[in-house]
């Protein structure tokens, strides 16, 4: 399995921006589609965004479309999540995950093979 480490979380005011990073090691990064999920206090983990192995296709949860951008740099074994216009209700632990299957990356967390430890994002009102 690939090992994943997220970074870039922190405290930001509503309307602000953050860029999360997820560094991969242990396996060939470009063999994995990548996803971002988040889990708010007292809620289930939910899909945020995903990107194919080569980065040519992305998909987003409706709630973050036009505000968040997922991207990847296979040369750096890193996937990013640029988050703009953040809202207080988006306070959560954000996780990156790797999906070794071919095709369009899944929105279902049980189809991802490897997970990072998460990074906390807190959006103040």
Image (cartoon, helix red, strand yellow):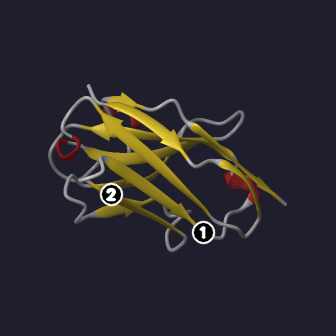
Q: Earlier in the sequence, mark 1 or mark 2?
A: 2
Residue 106 seen in the figure: no
Please report the residue visible at 47 percent of the width from the left and 50 percent of the height from the top.
21
Q: What residue sits right under mark 1 in the picture? A: 84
Asked if the residues shown at circle 1 and circle 2 are in contact, with their CB atoms under 8 angstroms apart, the answer is no
In the picture, which quadrant includes the C terminus?
Answer: bottom right
Q: What residue sits right under mark 2 in the picture? A: 72
Please report the residue visible at 45 percent of the width from the left and 32 percent of the height from the top.
116
Task: Categorize mark 1 by other alpha carbons within 10 Å: few (<14), some (14-19), many (20+).
Answer: some
Mark in the foreground, 1 or 2 = 2
Q: Secondary structure at mark 1?
A: loop
Residue 113, by quadrant, is top left
Q: Nearer the viewer, residue 23 or 108?
A: 23
User: Where residue 23 sits in the image (x, y, percent)?
Assistant: 39, 42
Q: Nearer the viewer, residue 60 or 86?
A: 86
Extreme residue in the bottom direction: 66
């Amino acid at each position: 399995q690939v090992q994943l480490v997220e970074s870039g979380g922190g405290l930001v005011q509503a309307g602000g921006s953050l860029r999360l990073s997820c560094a991969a090691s242990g396996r060939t990064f470009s063999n994995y589609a990548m996803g971002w999920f988040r889990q708010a206090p007292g809620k289930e983990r939910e899909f945020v965004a995903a990107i194919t192995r080569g980065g040519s296709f992305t998909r987003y949860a409706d709630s973050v479309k036009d505000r968040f951008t997922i991207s990847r740099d296979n040369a750096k074994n890193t996937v990013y999540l640029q988050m703009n216009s953040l809202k207080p209700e988006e306070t959560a632990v954000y996780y990156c995950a790797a999906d070794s299957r071919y095709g369009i990356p899944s929105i279902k967390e049980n189809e991802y093979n490897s997970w990072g430890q998460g990074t906390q994002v807190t959006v103040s009102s």
